[in-house]
Every structure is written in structure tokens, then in C-alpha cells.
Amino acid sequence: IWTTPAEIFIPAAASRLVTQSQVSQMIQSGLEVISPGANVPFADTEIFFGPIMEFTDQQVSLIPDFVSNCGIARLFAYLMESKIDLPMSDHSIFEDTSNTIRMALEKAHRMHPYKTDICKTAFEIALQELIG
């Protein structure tokens, strides 16, 4: 499957599976974007930003897993807010999660308006917000 032409790859089954060799094969076959459906999709020993993730981020548009997988965390935050639209609907929950993802990616793009290093930039933003 690694040489099958595809522009988008969504590693979603499990964590720590995708190797650098597999990423390279996909890039040679036309890969442009990776949007993880599983946390920590790369076979790095590091949790946050190992060498495979760094290599991938420098080659293609890599959406950070903590952004692409924020659905449940965002749902809990949404339910804790005092200004929930009642009656609550799947549409309002999806819209809130979608807006959160969009704002995170737009913020990363404002700091680094290129197709690569999206993940690195988003990590920098997250760290600044945690310590800031």
C-alpha cells in the first residue's frame, strides 16, 4: 500500500506504526498531507516529536495528532461551558470541534505560512500557551 498513489494519508488504526521508509515511499507516490486518526502514528520511541515525525513534517503537510484528534477533549470542554446552545445537537458539537481545529491550523499558518513544518509550529504554539 505504501506505493499506491495518494495525496492524503490518515493513519488511524493504532499508534507507532508508520516508519520513515513507508513515509518516503508514500512521498515518492505523491503524498501531500498526513492527518493522523491515531495519536503518535509514527514508529518513533519519542512520544512528542521524534525523528520520523520531524522528517515527515519537513517533507509534507503534517497535521499534528493533538489537533486532528481533539474531538473528545473538545467535546468535554464544550459540555463544561456555560453558554451551550440548548437543545444540544450533534451539529453544534461538530461545529464547535471543527472551529477549534480550524483556529489551531490557522494560528499555525499565521506563524509559519508554508506547507511544511506545520506540526513543529503547532507544538511551539502549544508549548508557549502552556508556559505562557
Image: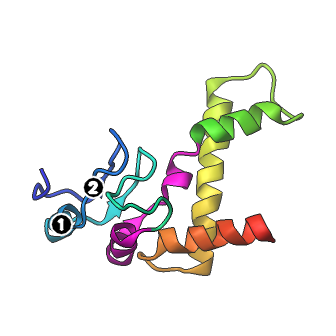
- Mark carried by residue 18: 2
The verdict on residue 53 being magenta is yes
Q: Secondary structure at mark 2?
A: loop
**115 with respect to 28 (left or right):** right
- Mark carried by residue 21: 1
Q: Secondary structure at mark 1?
A: helix
Please state which of residues 47 and 68 is positioned toward the viewer in this rendering. 47
Please give the name of the residue rendered at 71% of the width and 34% of the height, measured from the top-left corner: 76
- Mark carried by residue 115: none
Quarter of the rendering containing residue 132: bottom right
Label 1 to label 2: alpha-carbon separation: 8 Å
Picture layout, residue 60 above or below residue 75: below
Q: Looking at the picture, which amino acid does disc 2 mark?
A: Val
Please state which of residues 106 and 71 is positioned toward the viewer in this rendering. 71
**84 with respect to 110 (left or right):** right
Q: Position of residue 52 (x, y in %)?
A: 33, 68
Q: Position of residue 98 (x, y in %)?
A: 59, 45
Q: Looking at the picture, which amino acid does disc 1 mark?
A: Ser
**81 with respect to 66 (left or right):** right
Please give the name of the residue rendered at 52% of the width and 45% of the height, measured from the top-left corner: 69
